[in-house]
Image (cartoon, rainbow, N blue to C red):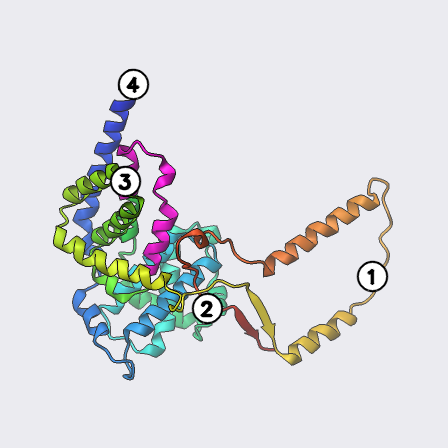
Amino acid sequence: MKDLGAEEQMSNEAFRLFRQLKLHLEQEWKFQPREKGLSLIERTAENENTLCPRLRNAKVEDLWSLTNFFGFTTETFVLAVNILDRFLALMKVKPKHLSCIGVCCFQLAAQVLEEECNIPSIHDVIRISQCKCTVSDLKRMEKIISEKLHFEFKATTALTFLHLYHTIVLCHTSEKKEVLNLDKLEAQLKACNCRLVFSKAKPSVLALCLLTLEVQTLKSIELFEIVLRVQKHSKISDSDLLYWRELVSKCLADYSSPECCKPDHKKLVWIVSRRTAQNLQNSYYSVPELPTIPEVGCCNESESEDSCEDMSCGEESLSSSPSDLEGNFFFDLKPKSKWQAFNCQS
C-alpha cells in the first residue's frame, strides 16, 4: 500500500520546484552577457592589442585555480565567470587590464556567496594571483565593475538551473540518487565555462544539455522521460537543445582526448631564489639556544613524541596535493595552478 502522506509531500515539493524554475526562467535574461559584446570578442584576432577569446579563456582558468586554492564553492567560480563575461561584453578591455578585472570579479563573487570569515584579504589575493596591481587599483576597478553592472551580482546562472534540474529529476525518479552524479555535472559545467562560446547560451539550455548528455550515458528511460518533461516546462525548443548539446558534447570530448592540454592540479611548490635560500639557511643556524624547559611530572616521553608528530603533520599539509574530487570522472578537469611555482623574491 502506498504512503499517501509521502505522495502528498512529494507533490508539494515538486510544485515548489517547478514554481522556482519558472521564476529563474523569467530572470535568466537579466544576467546574460550581451551577445553583441561576446561576438565582438570572438571575432578579435590574437595579434591585436585587444581582448581575444584565448585570453578570456585563460583568465577563466585562473579564476578556477583561485577558487580551488582558497577552497571556495563551484557557485563562487561560476558567478565570478558570469560577472567577468557581463563586464567584458559591456566594455572594451585591453589585455593589460584583464588580470586586475579577473581578481575583482573573483572578490565580488566571494563577497556574495562565501562566509565573511573565509574571504581572503586583498593583499593575499594579489600575492597568490600575481596580478601585478595594487590595492588601490583593485578598489578602483571594483568600483567601475559595480557601477557598470548596477551592483547586480547575485545572478541566475547555468549552475542554478543544473542544481534545480537535478533536484527535480531526483524528486520524480525511483532510481538511486547516486545514479545522477551532481559533482560530475558541475565539473563538466566548469569545462564549458572555460570556453567563451558557452557564455552566449541561455543558462537553462546549457544546464539541460549537460543533464541530457548524462542521462543518455546512463541509458535510463525513466530519467529520459523526466528530462523531456523538464524541457517542455522550461519551453526549450528541440532545435536549441540539439544545437548547444552538440557543442557541449564536442567540448567534453576535447577534454577527454589525450591530445588536449588539460589543466593539471599538481602539488603546490614554493620556489625561492638562491639568495633567499641562503638567508633562510643562515638564519636557521643563527637561532640562539633556548634554556632547557624543566620537565613536569604529568608530561612523559610518549606524550612529547605525539605532539611532535602533530606539528609535523601540520607542516606536511602545506605541500600536500589538494583533494582529488573531480579526478574520478571520465576526464580530468583539474585547473592548472598558475601559482604553483611561486617565486618569492628577497
Q: Which residues are magenta?
A: 165-192
Residue drawn at (25%, 23%) of the image: 8
Is disc 1 surrounded by few (<14), some (14 to 19) or many (20+) residues within 10 Å? few
Q: Residues within 10 Å of mark 3 (few under 14, many from 20)?
A: few
- Between label 1 and label 2, give the one nearer the viewer: 2
Above or below, 92 against 5 in this view is: below
Residue at disc 4, secondary structure: loop
* Quadrant housing the C terminus: bottom right
Label 2 Cα crowd, 10 Å radius (few <14 / some 14-19 / many 20+): many
Q: Are marks 3 and 4 in contact (CB under 8 Å)?
A: no
Q: Which residue is mark 1?
A: 290
Check disc 3 and report the residue beneath it.
220
| Badge nearest the viewer, 3 or 4 | 3
Could you tell me the amino acid type at mark 4?
Answer: Asp
Q: In which quadrant of the rendered image does the N terminus lie?
A: top left
Provide the secondary structure element on which disc 3 rests. loop
Q: Is 115 positioned to the left or the right of 288 in the image?
A: left
Q: Which residue is mark 4?
A: 3
For the residues labelled 1 and 2, the Cα–Cα distance comes to: 39 Å
For label 2, the residue is 129
The answer to which of marks 2 and 4 sits earlier in the sequence is 4
Query: Does the magenta portion include 77?
Result: no
Nearer-N-terminus badge (3/4): 4
